[in-house]
Image (cartoon, rainbow, N blue to C red):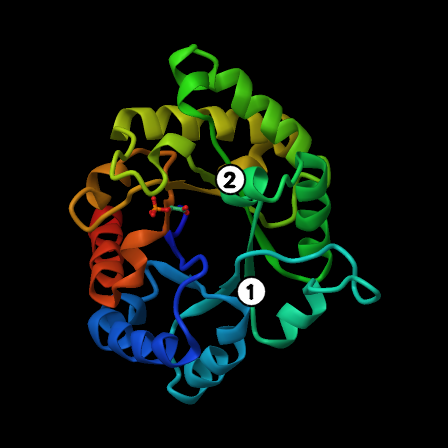
Amino acid sequence: MRKPLLAANWKMNQTVAESLSWLAEFDRDAADVLDNQEVEAVFCPPFTALYPLRQAIVAHKMDILLGAQDLFWQEAGAFTGEISPVMLAECGVSHVICGHSERRTLLQESSEMISKKCGAAVAAGLVPILCVGETLSIREGGLTQEWLEAQLFESLSFWDGKSEIVVAYEPIWAIGTGQAATAADAEAACAIIRDNLREKGGSYADQVRILYGGSVTPQNAAELLSGSDVDGALVGGASLKAAAFAAICRAAFRENC
Ligand code: PGA
């Protein structure tokens, strides 16, 4: 049984002060769902908010995990502007998003770079949340499966088939557009991803959590999460409102019960 994982990807939003008040509101709204340990919630704020959020989480004994939105694969050195896995671990980070499509397209991150990032995360004891997904033209051209397989092949070259990873299926056409995939399309893509993981990880692939991401809202979460291979969600826009993200966690909890 895979425990649902709900990840809030705040992208370049929320100051430290806003993050702290968001956390307090979310803890009020979702504490009952998180307390029973049936779902896990991980927050991925900007780097600047990680340490203060960690202090608040520890001080208030919250059942909330912290994630980063990126990392660099070196431990230390002359890499201006980069953040190392060790620095994230020191801030109490447990997960890190790798290869989000915004980084692949805006910052030209290649699957080779993403694989190195994921490998460095695993080596530091962090769980990478590897993002894959197709553009609209790839989908309309009927090439989604081939695309996902190629992205996984290249981005997973670090994977030994048994270390903990999370994969997020994020169709690019659904991100920030209000046009979520249908539950059937999300399930079909997540099943392709799991089959692919099986080739490398054998039966361990059944333990890997595969998330859907792209315009998830409190209204569509239950349906999107109903697929047997969909183990949670990576939520952007809707996660900026604490009440909305709490409602998505609640939908995942109900879906799992
Ligand atoms: P969205 O973003 O929920 O705003 O579509 C998802 C993501 O980019 O991870």
Q: Position of residue 122 (x, y in %)?
A: 68, 54
Q: Position of residue 104 (x, y in %)?
A: 58, 39
For the point 71% across and 42% down, the residue is 113
Q: Position of residue 223 (x, y in %)?
A: 21, 38
Instruction: Name the residue type under label 1.
Output: Ser
Q: Nearer the viewer, mark 1 or mark 2?
A: 2
Residue drawn at point x = 31 percent, y = 67 percent: 34
Q: Is residue 171 something one can see in this rendering?
A: no
- Amino acid found under the numbered disc labelled 2: Ser
Among numbered discs 1 and 2, the one appearing first in the sequence: 1
- 176 or 197: nearer the eye? 176
Q: Is residue 41 above or below residue 156?
A: below
Using the image, determine if residue 22 lies above or below residue 219: below
The residue indicated by pointer 2 is: 101
Q: Is residue 72 above or below residue 185?
A: below
Residue at x-position 67% and y-position 36%: 110
Q: Quadrant of residue 86?
A: bottom right
Q: Secondary structure at mark 2?
A: helix
Instruction: Give neighbour class at mark 1: few <14, some 14-19, many 20+ (Cα, 10 Å).
Output: many
- What residue is disc 1 on? 94
Q: CA distance from mark 1 to mark 2?
A: 21 Å
Identify the residue shown where x is 39% and y is 83%. 61
Q: Which mark is residue 179?
A: none
Q: Name the secondary structure under disc 1.
A: loop
Mark 1 CB lies closer than 8 A to ligand 1: no
Give the image quarter of residue 125.
Answer: bottom right
Return the x and y of residue 100 as percentages of the image width and height: 52, 44
Q: Is residue 245 visible?
A: yes
